[in-house]
């Protein structure tokens, strides 16, 4: 089965994430991986989906299927991100390098990995690198901003009733409770 090539658009910012590199770098994902690799992958996917809603980058999360026998590679589109499983004998690094060659210097591309050799290759191919720790800080900041906005919205929630109506409803509730009907 041949994998459909991704078409890159000029002016779109892209963030490639080396999935297993990140899983092996973030403490919470390392702990989860030690219980279940599938759960660690799913947690990272969910973090990237949530992060994608706050960033101006299209996220492409890449997992090695390097040692998966007869893997032809798979691409999934889920909640605004692309999830790539490479083909047999292809590492996430090689996949990302090839995609950077295809994109060229037509758009802004960042790659999240803590692999030092890969970081040098990324820079030589026109991308910019972000370490696993830097990505984690960006994801955490994003979560904090979302929580802050949600908290402010909850605090500033406007009641559909005016003060007089609210007072009358409270009095009615007390009256019902005092009369034993409630």
Image (cartoon, grey):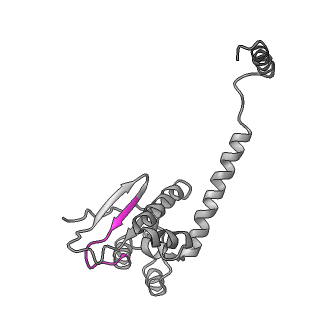
Residue 47 drawn at (x, y percent): 51, 60
Residue 27 picture quarter: bottom right
Question: Does the stretch in magenta take in 103?
Answer: no
Residue 88 drawn at (x, y percent): 25, 75
> In the orientation shown, which residue stands out farthest toward the front?
180
Q: Nearer the viewer, residue 130 or 66?
A: 66
* Residue at the image point whose x is 34% and y is 72% from the top: 102
Q: Nearer the viewer, residue 139 or 39?
A: 39
Q: Inspect this view and state whether residue 90 appears.
A: yes
User: Does 32 sit left or right of 9 as displayed?
Assistant: right
Query: Does residue 94 lie above or below 146 as drawn?
Result: below
Query: Does residue 46 lie above or below 115 as drawn?
Result: above
User: Does 179 sit left or right of 37 as displayed?
Assistant: right
Q: Nearer the viewer, residue 181 or 45?
A: 181
Question: Does the stretch in magenta take in 88?
Answer: yes
Residue range corresponding to the magenta coloring: 82-92
Q: Could you tell me which quadrant the N terminus lies in?
A: bottom left
* Residue at the image point whose x is 28% and y is 64% from the top: 74
* Residue at the image point whose x is 50% and y is 80% from the top: 114
Query: Does residue 14 lie above or below 117 as drawn?
Result: above
Query: Does residue 105 lie above or below 156 as drawn?
Result: below
User: Does 168 sit left or right of 38 as displayed?
Assistant: right
Q: How many labels, in total?
A: 0
User: Does 138 sit left or right of 66 as displayed?
Assistant: right
Residue 111 drawn at (x, y percent): 47, 73
Q: Inspect this view and state whether residue 57 appears.
A: no
Residue 173 drawn at (x, y percent): 75, 18
């Amino acid at each position: 089965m041949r994998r459909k090539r991704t078409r890159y658009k000029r002016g779109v910012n892209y963030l490639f994430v080396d999935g297993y590199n990140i899983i092996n770098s973030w403490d919470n994902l390392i702990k989860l991986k030690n219980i279940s690799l599938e759960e660690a992958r799913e947690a990272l996917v969910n973090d990237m989906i949530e992060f994608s809603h706050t960033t101006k980058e299209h996220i492409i999360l890449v997992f090695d299927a390097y040692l998966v026998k007869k893997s032809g590679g798979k691409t999934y589109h889920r909640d605004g991100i692309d999830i790539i499983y490479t083909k047999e004998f292809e590492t996430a690094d090689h996949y990302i390098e090839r995609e950077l060659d295809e994109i060229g210097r037509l758009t802004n591309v960042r790659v999240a990995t803590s692999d030092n050799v890969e970081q040098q290759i990324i820079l030589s191919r026109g991308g910019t690198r972000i370490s696993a720790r830097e990505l984690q800080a960006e994801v955490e900041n994003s979560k904090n901003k979302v929580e802050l906005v949600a908290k402010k919205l909850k605090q500033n929630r406007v009641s559909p009733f005016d003060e007089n109506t609210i007072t009358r409803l409270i009095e009615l509730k007390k009256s019902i409770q005092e009369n034993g009907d409630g």
